[in-house]
Amino acid sequence: MFKGARITWPPLKNGIIRSYTRLNPVKMYEAVEEDMFAYESLNAFFTRALKPACRPFEHDPNNWLCPVDGSVSQAQAIKNGRIFQAKGQDYSLLELVGGDKELEATFNNGQFATLYLSPRDYHRIHMPATGTLKQMLYVPGRLFSVATFVVSHIPRLFARNERCVCYFETEQGPMAMILVGAINVSAMETVWHGLITGEAKKIRRFDYSDKNIVLKRGDEMGRFNLGSTVIVLATDKMKIDSAMVAEAEIKLGQCLATPAI
């Protein structure tokens, strides 16, 4: 899939894109470039930019924005170090963050939102709030599908799949953005690191505490090269918005979380 998505020979590339859009209807009128065959490859088409007017941002700067288009898998409180996955399934916060006990302590009994991006969705990921990047962990793992049916049946799926844990400090407290790899997703990207692939066999830690990397609310922070899931972690200073319920359709820029009273 990695190589096929980067084929640039027009006859083959256009055929791949045509077949893809038949299986996954895409709203091309929302894209900056509306001609699907103008993209140099399936991957370029898949990571297309949207017209800003199509995704207005929630106006209150104290509220966190939904970082992606897609649907809510689950969104609720983190209870005693456990994160709810699906009916009858949960997993360890510590395992999700690659065994980092400081991150576990930071977000234990906080809030989480697991957001699923289907193949037809916009696949760039944006910042819920203005944040200063402190560290990133690359955690190698499996590439199980993250489709709803699979998530309901594979124990600890999000803590077993390949993932990238990005930790930020915001005015509303600590925030983690976790990019979860999945079947056919052999590459994730962040704007500060670039392409992240599954070549590493052990956890890799990147320290940015002295780099002063600041991303503003709504800025692009990364993208998936094919579909997957983003998990947002917050402390108890934030509360997940009441509209973030399982299976709800979501759009980039709507309210994700509000300051806890």
Image: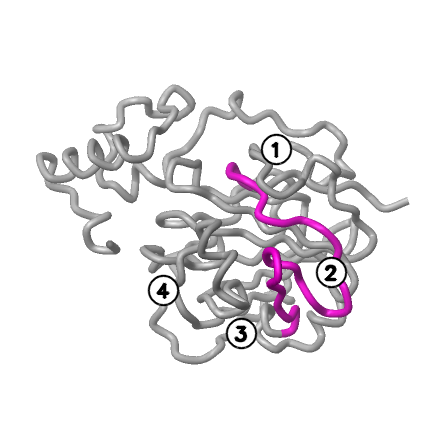
The secondary structure that dominates the magenta segment is: strand
Residue 16, image x and y in percent? 18, 39
| Furthest residue in direction bottom, as rendered | 202
From the viewer's side, name the closer residue of 191 and 100: 100
- What is the number of the mark on residue 205? 3
Gap in Å between the C-alphas at discs 1 and 4?
28 Å
Residue beneath disc 2:
78
First to last magenta residue range: 68-94
Q: In this view, does 153 lie above or below 140?
A: above
Mark 2 or 4, nearer chain start: 2
Furthest residue in direction right, as rendered: 261
The residues bearing labels 4 and 3 have C-alpha atoms spaced at a distance of 14 Å
Amino acid type shown at disc 1: Gly
The image's colouring method is one colour
Q: Which of marks 2 and 1 is in front?
A: 2
Q: Is residue 159 toward the left or the right of residue 47 in the image?
A: right
Q: Residue 218 in magenta?
A: no
Whichever of labels 3 and 2 marks the residue nearer the N terminus, that label is 2
Residue 197: which disc? Answer: 4
User: How many marks overall?
Assistant: 4
Check whether the beta carbons of the residues at disc 2 and disc 4 lie within 8 A of each other.
no
- Residue in the picture at 65% in, 73% down: 94
User: How far across and how far down the image is residue 180, in percent?
Assistant: 48, 58
Is the N terminus in the top left, top right, bottom left or bottom right quadrant? bottom left
- Contact between labelled residues 1 and 2, with CB atoms less than 8 Å apart: no
Amino acid type, residue under disc 4 in the picture:
Thr
Work out whether residue 175 or residue 22 is closer to the camera in this orientation and state it. 22
The percent position of residue 99, horizontal first and vertical second, equals: 61, 78
Q: How far apart are marks 2 and 1 (CA)?
A: 23 Å
Q: Kindly state the secondary structure of the residue where label 2 is placed.
A: loop
Instruction: From the image, tell me which residue sits under label 1.
Output: 253
Task: Please tell me whether mark 3 or mark 2 is closer to you in this view.
Answer: 2
